[in-house]
Amino acid sequence: MSRKRQSDTEHTVPALYAMVQPGLEPVAADEITRDLGGEVKKTSRGVVVFKLPEITPDILKLRTTEDLFVLAWGSDTLTYRPPDLVNFRKWTANRPDWGRLFRIHHAIRPKIKGKPTFHIVCQMQGEHGYKRYDAHQAIVDGLRNKVPPGLIAQEENAWLEVWLTIRGKTAVCGVRLTDRTMRHRTYKTDHVPASLRPTVAAAMVRLAGISPGMTVLDPMCGAGTILAEAIDLCNRRKTREVTMLGGDLDPNAVFVTGENLACVGQAQLARWDVRQLPLAAGTVDRIVSNPPFGKQLLTPQDVGPLYGQMARQFDRILKPGGRGVFLVAEYEPLRDSLRDVGWKPTRQHKVRVLGQPAVLSAWQKPDALATMSE
Ligand SMILES: C[S@@+](CC[C@H](N)C(=O)[O-])C[C@H]1O[C@@H](n2cnc3c(N)ncnc32)[C@H](O)[C@@H]1O
């Protein structure tokens, strides 16, 4: 390589990619652009490829992403046939400057005590004419003599990990810059059934648009994930004087929320029934919630009546112009109930939560004064 080309390569910041919950790519792209000043280059299902002027530990502040990687190579023209394997090995062996990618990794994730560990992870979705094991082996072969010596093989949560992710005709390969705390957080010490993924809760509170002085409510708070993410977002943005309210029918959920919020921040919590909320009319600015859905928590015939009563309560307590953000599996009953009280949909994202399809939607209650002046 000529000296000029080598110095150009050294000065070009490599691309990064984020793994996100399928369906949340636009929300993650918005966070990457606005909060980090990144430039999104490409998105595909569950993956956002982006560039930053500089790669610093600030990337670990992202909240809607599950994992971050520095890109070694990517392709969206896989053939689904065995020649892909030859390319995986060739691209891994020839394309990236692995030494540089590993140095970027070490700057973000400094060595911890004990022997440093290493692992190659291969994920594959879709019907391909080769096995996941073969794709994994292609990366092992391509990386021969490129990995620093002295690393101990470790199956899970290794310090240094190279991942190959194949989804249909798309593949990305890179060095993982994050660990499990990005997707699971550190505050979630206690759980309830059907507790929400923190990254999904983070996407919901971003869509809510919380401003100083607001009152934010999750009336079916479960383990308190949405409240924790809302408090965290307000803390990081220095959004002052926000009142957080939470409650649940299940007293254990209220207790668990208290435990999980202990090291995050303050919320007023109560045991209540969403169908009879003990809150005064027109006192809440934002409702962000994940009502019970799926066989685990509700029978299909219970969904419609519950959502209908819930929507009438929400309409009573929300201020005119206020917003609601909801995640449900059964979208039609929610949509019909909120339309019945006159709310307007503003955003909709089809996502997958706990392995099942769900809809994340944002709604606005009309502002009576604004409507009169139209
Ligand atoms: C899907 S879970 C919420 C999970 C929560 N977002 C989390 O991350 O842990 C739904 C919650 O609604 C609560 N719930 C069910 N019926 C309710 C009702 N009538 N009033 C209040 N809460 C209710 C359940 O106890 C459960 O905790």
Image (spheres, rainbow, N blue to C red):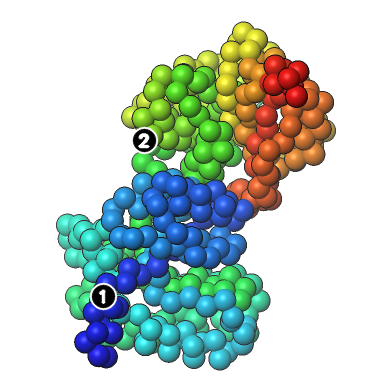
Relative to 274, is 241 on the left or the right?
left
Q: Quadrant of ligand 1?
A: top right
Q: Provide the residue designation for mark 2.
A: 236
Vertical side of 239 occupied by 196: above or below: below
The one of 218 and 2 positioned closer to us in this rendering: 2
- Residue 231 at x, y = what percent? 42, 29
Q: Residue sitting at 39 percent across and 43 percent down?
A: 185
Relative to 352, is 119 on the left or the right?
left
- Residue 29 at x, y = what percent? 51, 53
Which of pointers 2 and 1 lies earlier in the amino acid sequence?
Answer: 1
- Residue 157 at x, y = what percent? 35, 60
Check disc 2: other Cα within 10 Å, few if <14, some if 14-19, many if 20+: few
Amino acid carrying mark 2 in the image: Arg
The one of 262 and 253 positioned closer to us in this rendering: 262
Q: Residue sitting at 41 percent across and 19 percent down?
A: 241
Residue at disc 1, CB closer than 8 Å to ligand 1: no
Res 314 visible = no
